[in-house]
Amino acid sequence: MTMSIALFLLKQGTTLVAQSEQLEAEPKVHLLSPYAVSGKTKITLTEWPDYSEDDHILLHSDSLLTVCEPSPKVKQAYLDKLGTTEEVLNTPTKPVILTEED
């Protein structure tokens, strides 16, 4: 699974930053650890969606206005919020083979 950090502008006006991957069929976008972005001079990240503790969110393409690269300031705020670095996020994980005993 290849994920990258992206900025999402939703049709309803919300701006999100999240790790994401594009899927083959609808819902077209898988978001991991999404946060709503607000503020111009002081960036504030708020867990999204409200009232949920889910880290994995699926979005339909008809909800999106556009997807783009976040500014360095937003990307760093996101990494700080996750408590990680971009290098750690980009480290490939080893595949896990599950058996019926697992």
Image (cartoon, rainbow, N blue to C red):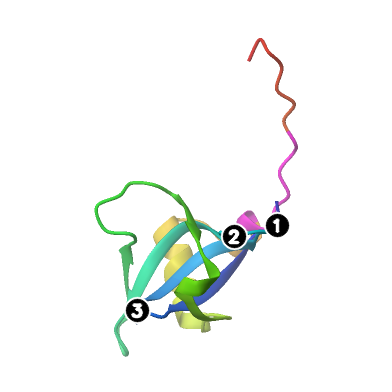
Image coordinates of residue 68 in percent, x first then y, are: 57, 82
- The majority secondary structure of the magenta stretch comes to loop
Query: Residue 102's image quarter?
Result: top right
Considering only vertical position in the picture, is 87 above or below 93?
A: below
Q: Which residue is disc 1 drawn over?
A: 2
Disc 2 and disc 3: Cα gap in Å? 19 Å
Considering only vertical position in the picture, is 53 above or below 43?
A: above
Q: Residue 12 has which mark?
A: 3
Task: Say few, some or many: other residues with alpha carbon within 10 Å of mark 2 (under 14 / 14 to 19 / 20 or more).
Answer: few
Disc 2 or disc 1, which is closer to the eye? 2
Q: Earlier in the sequence, mark 2 or mark 3?
A: 3
Task: Say few, some or many: other residues with alpha carbon within 10 Å of mark 1 (under 14 / 14 to 19 / 20 or more).
Answer: few
Q: Amino acid at mark 2?
A: Glu
Disc 1 or disc 3, which is closer to the eye? 3
Q: Earlier in the sequence, mark 1 or mark 3?
A: 1
Residue sitting at x 46%, y 70%: 17
Residue sitting at x 31%, y 89%: 41
Q: Earlier in the sequence, mark 2 or mark 1?
A: 1
Residue sitting at x 56%, y 59%: 27
- Secondary structure of the residue carrying tag 1 is loop
Disc 1 and disc 3: Cα gap in Å? 27 Å
Q: Which residues are magenta?
A: 88-95
Q: Which residue is disc 2 drawn over?
A: 26
Image coordinates of residue 25 in percent, x first then y, are: 65, 59
Residue sitting at x 73%, y 49%: 92
Considering only vertical position in the picture, is 51 above or below 39?
A: above
Q: Amino acid at mark 1?
A: Thr
